[in-house]
Image (tube, rainbow, N blue to C red):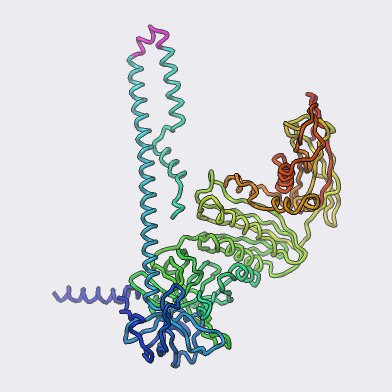
Amino acid sequence: MKFSRILGVCVLLLLLVYCPAGMAAPPEIITTDQLSEGMVGIGKTVISGSKIEEFQVKVIGVMKNSGSTGGDLILVRLYGDAIDRAGGVAQGMSGSPVFFNGKLAGAVAFGWNLSDPRICMLTPIAEMLKISEDMRIEVAKKEKRKAEKAARQRAEDNAEITKLTKEREQEKKDAAGDKGKDADSAKDPEKTKKTAKKNKNTDSKKGETGSNIDDGSVAKKDNAAADTYLPPANPKPKATPLMARGFSAQGLEILRQQLKEFDIVPYSVGEAPYGTADIKLEPGSAVSVELIRGDMSLGVLGTVTWVDGDEVLAFGHPFTKRGSVNYFLSNAWTFTTVSSINSAFKVGASGKMLGTVMQDRGSGVSGKIGTYPDVVPMLITVSDFTRGIHKSSTVQIVNDEIFSPALAEAAAVSIIDRTVDRKGEGTAVIKFTVRAADLPDGREIKRENMFYSSRNITESLTSELAAGLRLLTRNRYYPVSLTDIDVQIEITDQRNTATILSARPLAEKANPGDTIGIEVTLQPYRGDKFTKVVHFTVPKEQEEGTMPLMIRGGTSLAGLQNVVQQQQLAEAAVLLRQDTDKNKTFAEEIDEFNKRDCNHDVVVDLLYGTTDKGPASKNGKKNAGTVPSAVKEQQINEFVRGSKYKTNTPVYQIVTGETVTSVEIVNVQETIGIDG
């Protein structure tokens, strides 16, 4: 009996020690109609470190229907030692819970800049609890979609297995029947022919469906579609400081530009100290909502208002106000709180990831402890061949249509900056692969390109990476979920460029459909001239006569400028729109992006306008009359994107310049000399 009692006490102690703070029962609440002027209460927040401190709160009044969602706001004055040391209501105190008579009234959320720093407004807890309800609904929807997807997959697998089983049984019956008929068939030649034909058809069908049930099931799983459907103007929210770790100055600038519409500015901070992992979320503790984790971190700092089991409410005002979201929920460390004439602010760092922020609305953010957000792993490898330095960085980025491209670009730029550690001239090669679920036929974004800059080699290296990510995340067809990003960059401080001087075909005549060789002469920067043989296949429908060809570098824009000068502004605008072809498929857009001209390409294409046959005269020859505007628009599009006959040949230099040559097309079957 003694032993069992002692064991029970030990178990209870263990539960008390290891039970998360979030498992404590939430406090009672007090509504705005129960508050009156002069009531005094207490608030909770962290001024430095992780210690939760109390401050005093006095009600000034209730501002009816003045909240961002139409609810009330509670006007209060804060005071006490903690507020004095903080310099008033500080950025990062958003979400600090305020209690009257031991009951939770709401969270510190709004204030005025350049005014009394001790006066602010609270978002009532009743308004914030609505976000938790939104989160529960969203979680239920996700679970339902997940279950429906699993049920569909099981049904598909069962149907496939049933189909294959029936085919196997039928094959066995046919085989058994054939054995019994062998003797009769030997006597009847016609029966022998029919049997042979039937066996042939059966073998063909077996080859199409697969002879192994498991193989057919796995293939079906691999191809199954994933579940893709898975602030007041005055006063203002007490801004939540966005703490950035591991980003370079240029990376931070990209974030500032991309995030300015959300009225948040990133500050560079250090890493949280050891021991942060032990900080549990409870009302008044510091909390971080992160967008990227790993070797770099970007997290907004605030305060926990409410914890109920594994549910957390914080901030009292929005972060991005994008409704249902997918952000990291982490604990945080506060280095200090800095006084300021404009507004005091906390300086802190994100700590251990504890869950997922699922709702971001006008009254705050809500998250769930113990869940893991949908993330995109990213590997960045940079090699500076001039200094012999190689660095790799791994991060996890939230899978988000808006933020993922900007975060990936800023992360890549930052690791480049930290590896090269200079500004100035240089040439670089960037290779990147972006994979995502449910892309057409397993496609992926994959590019290799070369860049040169005389000022700052990192400034344009990542533009294509961001463009490729936006092509996927902001596509007009259906939502996709990024699965991983791999970026490899090689940099040297040398200028590696070449200019096209001339080009000549290695055959004066060619037939439609022939592949001809073209010898291109290039002049490298401060180097000796060299020649490169490229190839071009004559269109099968090409008419007799002279076929002009343009040979240009992948960076050449002179031809485009000439075209634009010849066209009206409206036509040029149509040309440069990304959505010119409304009938283009998602697969075609991905293929077009992957096949874009590279800066180190020698490009050979039909000269502008030569694919247009124009209005024909009675004798069948091309009419020299006016080409319809629709045809001209198509011609311009062909020039910018290249015709379907265009060929690209990579060299080891960034290629500039262009030249024109021609080949005589004949309609006779004669042997044309083609270079090797």
Prevailing secondary structure of the magenta residues: helix
Q: Classify residue 132 as left or right of residue 429.
A: left
Q: Residue at x 41, y 40 (%)?
A: 217
Q: Quadrant of the C terminus?
A: top right
Q: Quadrant of residue 490?
A: bottom right
* Nearer to the camera, 529 or 601: 601
User: Is residue 314 visible from the viewing direction of this image?
Assistant: yes
* Nearer to the camera, 156 or 643: 643
Q: Classify residue 71 as left or right of residue 588.
A: left
Total numbered labels placed on residues in the image: 0
Q: Is residue 106 above or below residue 328?
A: below
Q: Residue at x 73, y 50 (%)?
A: 571
Residue 189 is a magenta residue: yes
Q: Is residue 190 above or below residue 285?
A: above
Q: Quadrant of residue 544?
A: top right
Which span is picked out in magenta? Answer: 181-191
- The location of residue 614, given as percent across then percent down, is 76, 36
Q: Quadrant of the N terminus?
A: bottom left
- The location of residue 561, given as percent across then percent down, is 79, 53
